Structures are given as C-alpha cells and as structure tokens.
Image (spheres, coloured by chain):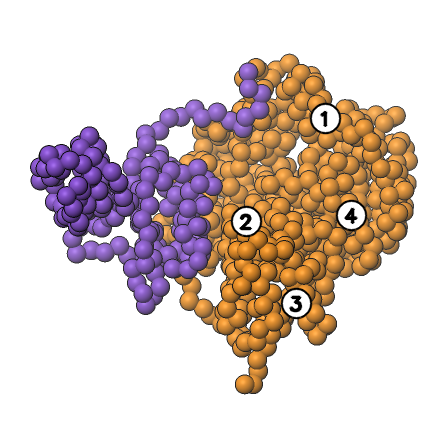
Amino acid sequence: MANLFTGADILFKVLEDQGVEYIFGYPGGAVLPIYDELKNHKKIKHILVRHEQGAGHAAEGYARSSGKPGVLLVTSGPGATNAVTALTDAYMDSVPLVCITGQVPTHLIGTDAFQECDTTGITRPCTKHNWLVKDIKKLSSVLHQAFRVATTGRPGPVLVDIPKDIQFQKGKYTKLKEFKNSNNITNIKFNGMDKDIDKTIELIKKSSRPILYTGGGVINSGPRGTELLRELVSLTKFPITSTLQGLGAFPGSDQQFLGMLGMHGTYEANNAMHDCDLMINIGARFDDRITGKIDEFSPKSKKIHIDIDPSSINKNVKVDIALVGDVKFVLEKIILAIKKKNQNFENFNKKNIAAWWKQIENWRKKNSLGFKKSQSIIKPQFAVQRLYELTKAQDVFITTEVGQHQMWAAQHYKFDKPNRWMTSGGLGTMGYGLPAAIGVQVANPGKLVIDIAGEASVLMTMQEMSTAVQYNLPIKIFILNNQYMGMVRQWQELLHEKNYSESYTEALPDFVKLAEAYGCVGIRAEKPEELDKKIAQMLSINKPVIFDCVVDKMENCYPMIPSGKAHNQMLLGDKDEEEISEEGKVLV
Amino acid sequence: MVKSAYSFLTKKEKIENHIIVVWVDNESGALARVIGLFSGRGYNIDSLTVAEVDRKKNISRITIATSGTPHVLQQIKLQLGKLVPVHKVADFPKNKKTILREMALLKVVSSKTNLKKAKKICKKYKYTILDKTEKSFILEISALKKEIDELVKKLQPLGLASTSRTGVLAMTKGSEIYKQN
C-alpha cells in the first residue's frame, strides 16, 4: 500500500504539477482538510481574501495579467455562492479560472446539511464545465482535466466540488497525462480550408475601405497572437480598431489605431466600421455594445470572422467567411499567404486605400474624445489623461470598476502592450477592479498597478484593501469620485428626463480616513492645479494608496451611440442631446 | 413608452421543426447541462427522450424535438457541441429520410359498449393490448406523434383514463450512420 495520499494532498500535487504558484481563497468548514495540508506545500502561496468574490476577481486579475490560469479555493455553501459573480464574470470575458470548492461529506449531500448548497447545479451555467468528485480514484484525473478545460479552446472558468470526506480519503495520485478527449473543440488550432484563406486574401486585395476589428481573442491567443496582429497591420496598412477587451493587443499610440469602437468608441472608429467595405473581425464577438442597431450594422461590408469558438460565428452578425481557430494560427496562415503570392503588396495596398485613410483623417479631426477643460474643477477625463501622462514611462497595469470611469479609462489611457488592461466587459461587474488589482500585483511584483475606479463600484469590494495591506501589495486605487453612479445618472439624464432615481449616494465614507483605517495611505485631490503633484505623491508611496479624486459631478461620457442607433448616429456631446429620438430613448 | 430595452426584434424568420440528436457521456449532470442550455438560452424543447445506448462506452443518446428559426437551430447545435460531455450532435431532418417514432400507453376505463367502440377505433393503428379487465384495457401504440394525438383525441370521449407518452425517437434511413463531425 505504498504511495497513497489524502484527497487534500492530491489536490496540492495537481496544483504543483500544473505549475500553480498562488491560490486565492478563504477557509471554512468544508475545506479544512485542504487548509490543513497547505503547510506541507511551500511552493504554493495562499492569498487570504476578505470575501470569496474578491478571491474570484483576484484570480481573474492574476490570470489576465500573467496568461496563466487563476486558482481560487473556497468553502461550501456561502463560499461557493459568493464566488458565483466572479465565475460568471470570467465566463463572459473568457478568463481561465479553476475554482475549488469544499462540499459537505458525500453521505450528507441532499440532506440540507449545514453550509450545503447544490454548487455544481448553481455554477453549471456560469462555468465551461464543473465536477462533483465523489470517488477519490477520480480526483487527480478530474483536477488535471479541469486545468485543461479552463485553458484550452476559448478559455473560461471551471469548478471542482470536493466533499470533505473525499479530502480525507486516501488514494493514488496519477500524473498529468493525455486523457481521452471527448470534445474536439477544446483543442482547436485551425480547422478551416485553405480556400477560405485564399478568399480572405482576395477580399483583402480588392478592398478599398477595409478595417480590422480586434478583440480579447487576440490577447488570449498569447504573445504570438499579438505579434502577428502587429505584423498584419503593418503589412496591410489597414486601419485597426479594438473592443474594450482587446485594448493593448495593438499599440494605442500608433497612427493606424483608431481607438476603441462601440457605444463609447471614437467617431473615426465607429464611422469606419459603418462605411467599410471589408471588416475583419479578429477574436471579437459582435457584442451588442459594439454593433449598436444590428440591422444597420456596417451595411456595405463583406465580413470575415476569426474566432476559436464556432458558436460565435453568425451568432449576432452574419459573416461571409468564418475562420474558426486560434488567432495566432489563422493570422500566421493569412500573413504567409499574403507574402507568398503577393510581392510588393504593401505599396499596392497603400495606394488602394489612400482615399479611405483621407476620409478617416477627416473623421479624426472631430476630436470626439475632446471635452471642455476647467480651471476650477477636475474633469474626470483630464484626471485620466494626467494619470496616463505621469505613468506612461513605466510598465503599468490598469484595472477598472464598471461605469463612466471605465469608459474614460478605455478612451484616454493608451495601452501599448497586451495583458496590461483588466476590466469587466461582458458581465459589467462593479467591484471587479480592486480585487483584480490585487491579483495583478501578485502576478507582477514590483510593477505599477492602478485601479481606475468609481466611488460607487469600489465600495462593493472595498474590504479587499485589507488583503492588499496584509501582503504588502502596493496597488493604487484611483477613484474618480462624483458621488453618483455616473453611468446610471448619465442614462437617466439622457433617457429618463433627468429623473435621478437613487443614483446619488448621500453618504460616502471619507476615503482618506478609510485608507488610514485599513493601514494604507489616503490622498485627496480637489483642484486641477494640485492633481499632478498629488499623483506624483501617490506614485512615490510604496504602499497601497486610495486616491480620492473629486471630479465634476455632472460630466457625461461621450461620444456615445445611444442603443438602437447605428454607428454613424453618434452623440458627440451635450449639444447633441436633443437629437435623441423618442425611439432611441427606448433602448438601453 | 418603454424606456429601457436592449433592442427590438425587427426581422421575423420562419420557425422550423427539427430533431436534434446528442450523444453524451452517461454521467451525472449531463442531461441537466443539455436542458440548462436550452432553458438558459431560451430555446424550445417540444419533447425529449434519453437513455443509455452503449453500456461499454457509457454513452447516452438524447433525442430532442425542437423548433426555432434556422439561425437559432444553428446556435443550438454549436452550443451543444461545446459541452464537455457531448460527443456529437446531429440534426435529423423531418422528412422521408428520417424514421420518427413515439410510443404511448393508453388506459381506457369504461362500459362494455364503450370499450368495444374504443377497440374498433384502434383497429386503424398498430397496437398491442397489454392488460385487460371487464372495465378496462391498456394498449401500447408506437406511431408518429400526430397519429397518437389523433387516437388520444378519439379515445377521450370513450373513457381514456390515463395517458403516458414518450418523446420522439429518430433514426436516419439506409445503411449510413451519423459520423462524428
């Protein structure tokens, strides 16, 4: 009976084999055997959070900034239900997470035992797959498979529910091995036809008004995906725009980059999307925040869609060519084909699309991200711009919460590298940014990590400041404080006759004192002239900082495509307000 | 006026009826995943039949009668294909190339004359009597859905007391079998 290990030990052996260095977690009754075993595995460091949702977002931040799966460990019942928001968030944004939950002992399952819940039932719709392990013999293979499912194909969260008696039981440990793959989709490189690539090249050659529309899939494809995207852009000279999740895949400061597209995207990006004759979607999913009114979405274009998930094809928008596969493999084929068959392509193409670029430059002149400057009050856009100017020399990682501040960050902070921008896009989870920043800082010690936050969002997971202090994680929480749920207020102003129903927070904590209570540093800026000095002060502190940036309460985030409008019907500022039709007000 | 909606449905597409067949690992939760996908994404299930078909390989075959626009049906197949325990997904056309069958158990409780009448009605269909008393009989019928619907309707006034029906089963005609895509 040699080499038998407890379930808890087997879990750690798997984590070690998978190269896991950090787990984010919170102990409880049903995971005590695992926590007991932790001391014997010095390679794995545990980060104790203050709420299981925080563990989930921290694991997301870790995963998105490092390219490795994030691991969280929580107890049964409330531990599991608290993690559900983070799992759903990771599912929507394709973030690889492995969530280990404790469960009541197998003989108590179904008896409404203390801290029992149907964890696999609850998390079935918000994970790629989940398992309840009732047999110690299956534990190691299930755990290895969990890592594989989370990280292959379109990445996403998985969950393994381990009853307490299984954690105690003894069984054999089996190493990682090739297991029978029941589902080919987890393993897609590129299964398309060469003729589709040829057709793609033909369209690229014929196009006189092309645009590349890129998304998070490029970043998920890894560094090679990003490299190849940059090569394709320089080879074709095509204009490129990006979704919220794709920012950083292509340098934000490059001339060929038109900025973000979609509801709060730039005038030039959205108009180019509307008027183009060829759209190449690389790793994006035609989300409703991107397309606007679907019937009027880019009516004159041929559309090519590169996506690893076959169910993304034709889901929202019908495309002419579907290239199902990992971005890096598909781009490699396209680039190779262009180079092989089309010498002097660059010069030829430059001429071909010169008029298009002229048109784009005209749109650019609108300066759609412009805003009225103020001497007396800090404009939120100005705050983000100053933050960018004062930090751009460093390798900065930015997380955000959800709302106006998130859009301003996306518009005014420029990313030149992938994996530097972590934001909750699909689910739109307020409270994401602070715990995510913790995960990012854990994965990137010594780097500058800033959560550009709103005061309402950040209060949802504020307790994690305590985690940051415990592990000396010098994250910077840069709060654009307007005392409103700003995006809600903006919609109420534009679409609900300025009925600011419950979007104003009458009572807020004093963020400077709050910072001090947590054992970190608080800074407040109220005047534009003190902003630079205060930001410099924040950057000089090697401790977690809460920066309370008091900004204009009534500022709106523009440009904006009101829901139900097409890309060429943007609002550029307050003066456009009266242009929202009755019909437009209906849509969100 | 409604103030907040994501968008309006503007296009009306034709609804089609299809039979989707799914081969899955026979493991706990597999059926729940398939059903959850349908309810979660708002797809229809008109009927559903499931049983293990390969003991050795531990595989169950799920037959789902569904309806939707061609676009929705395409999504159903692709989304099912992403589930980890799913081996393959087939879309059986509802035409001459596919054999469709449903089974029903029908219990009629009535007077002698009515029972006689009921049996006369049944003659038109292929059926087996499984149980008989003076006051009742139970018959088994295997037929198309619309035939069973028809029979049920006719038996109702004659004392149909209990109806138990399966969902639809489907198989393609000829020597070919559905290969993994």
Q: CA distance from mark 1 to mark 3?
A: 44 Å
Q: Which mark is residue B57?
A: none
Q: CA distance from mark 3 to mark 2?
A: 23 Å
Kind of residue indicated by mark 3: Ile
Q: Which residue is mark 2?
A: A122
Identify which residue, A321 or B73, lies in the foreground.
B73
Subunit of mark 2?
A
Which chain did the renderer colour orange?
A: A
Of callouts 3 and 2, which one flags the residue occurring earlier in the amino acid sequence? 3
Q: Which residue is mark 4?
A: A463
> Label 3's element?
helix
Q: What shade has chain B been given?
A: purple
Of callouts 1 and 3, which one flags the residue occurring earlier in the amino acid sequence? 3
Q: Which mark is residue A34?
A: 3
Apparent side of residue A303 relative to residue A17 in the rendered image (left or right): left
Q: CA distance from mark 1 to mark 4?
A: 23 Å
